[in-house]
Image (cartoon, rainbow, N blue to C red):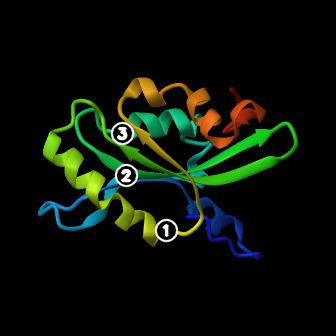
Amino acid sequence: MKVRKAQANEDEKKKRKKAVLFCLSEDKKHIVLEAGKEILTGDVGTTIADPYLHFVKMLPADDCRYALYDATYETKETKKEDLVFIFWAPEGAPLKSKMIYASSKDAIKKKFTGIKHEWQVNGLEDIKDRRTLAEKLGGSSVVTLEGGPV
């Protein structure tokens, strides 16, 4: 998600992924990219006004997921982009699902380089307020997240 080419053209920039969700395959033996559950950088500002809010709405209410979110934010000193690994395990998810996802979390994390932050979220209350993510990214020094104030 975060690998960048120095001379990337505009089309390549638009195809970069801002956020993706991963789920278990039907047989529960593989971690796969969930079809249709991604946000492309090119969609931000055109078809998606608030990428963070859109991302939160993509999370299922009754099952676990892994997510990678490329957070763009500003601190009092500088602009930053960090890759956040999110383990979504809502209260309403089946216990078996929570156990499988929890036990395979390290396997998927090892596949991705550049993860700066890890966040386990157990319900919508924990994630719907962007200030919670801002705290994970840098605490009180974060002044904007995805172009909006925190």
Q: Amino acid at mark 2?
A: Tyr
Q: Amino acid at mark 3?
A: Leu
Residue 49 image-quadrant placement: top right
Q: Position of residue 91 (x, y in %)?
A: 26, 30
The residues bearing labels 1 and 3 have C-alpha atoms spaced at a distance of: 20 Å
Residue at the spot 20% in from the left edge and 62% down from the top edge: 25
Judged left or right of residue 32, residue 47 is right
Residue at the spot 14% in from the left edge and 60% down from the top edge: 26
Q: Position of residue 102 (x, y in %)?
A: 29, 52
| Image: 5 above or below 91 | below
Q: Earlier in the sequence, mark 1 or mark 3?
A: 3
- Which secondary structure lies at badge 1? loop
The residues bearing labels 1 and 2 have C-alpha atoms spaced at a distance of: 12 Å
- Which secondary structure lies at badge 3? loop
Judged left or right of residue 117, residue 103 is left
Residue 46 image-quadrant placement: top right
Label of residue 66 in the image: 2
The residues bearing labels 3 and 2 have C-alpha atoms spaced at a distance of: 10 Å
Tell which of 141 and 28 is nearer to you: 141
Residue denoted by label 1: 112
Q: Earlier in the sequence, mark 3 or mark 2?
A: 3
| Image: 17 above or below 127 | below
Q: Amino acid at mark 1?
A: Phe
Judge the density around disc 1: few (<14), some (14-19), many (≥20) Cα neighbours within 10 Å. few
Residue denoted by label 3: 59
* Quadrant of the drawing holding the N terminus: bottom right
